[in-house]
Amino acid sequence: MNIKTFNLPTTLTIIRILIIPIFIIEAPANPQLGAFLFLIASITDFLDGYLARKFKQITKLGIILDPIADKLLVITALIILVDLVRVPAWIATIIILREFIITTLRFYALSRGVIIPAEKAGKAKTVLQMIAILFLFIAEEIYGLDLYDVGLILIYIATFVAVYSAIKYLFYFWRNIK
């Protein structure tokens, strides 16, 4: 692990965190701008992880900030989408509760010296959520494809995958924490 605290991946994570307040202010009144800000933040999420692994620039600060930034971005987006009546409140509630529970368990495990690694279902959930949220903010028909309908289908699938991955994380947690 790189000892240096600030590097490009960590800077990208901080940029994502700084985008969130602008997103909160702008997205409710201008969902198209919200979609753009969400897209930029999502790209930084992909890039920070990719660059940290590729150039071996994983830091303790990045390990802590990255999941927090991810959760803040998704949770704020879901709350705004519920307010815009584009996502059912029960869907947002399930996803938000899942994020709080699993993030808490992962940090608890880390405090006990156990790293609960990201797994494929959790990564799939994140990708599905990001695409669904983006489409739900755009919510227009493009080339005959209604992005709102596609986004809604994807958020339902993401919710199922979120619950499935939460169960996998819970089993891993109980097996590895004594």
Image (spheres, helix red, strand yellow):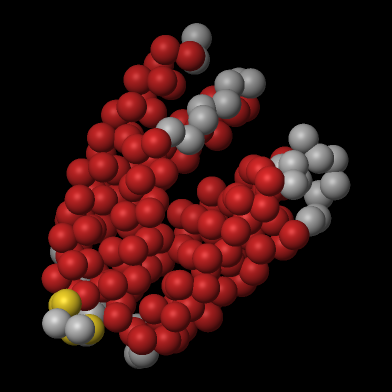
154 is higher (above) or lower (below) than 172: below
99 horizontally vs 167: left or right:
right
**Residue at image point 57% right, 26% down:** 115
7 is higher (above) or lower (below) than 56: below
- Res 64 seen here: yes
Residue 19 position by quadrant: bottom right
**Residue at image point 20% right, 84% down:** 143
Which percent across, then down, holds residue 59? 74, 43
- Residue lying furthest front in this view? 143
Which percent across, then down, holds residue 174? 40, 16
Which percent across, then down, holds residue 169? 38, 28
137 is higher (above) or lower (below) than 161: below
- Residue lying furthest right in this view? 4
Q: Quadrant of the N terminus?
A: top right
Q: Toward the viewer: 142 or 35?
A: 142
41 horizontally vs 146: left or right:
right
Residue 10 position by quadrant: bottom right
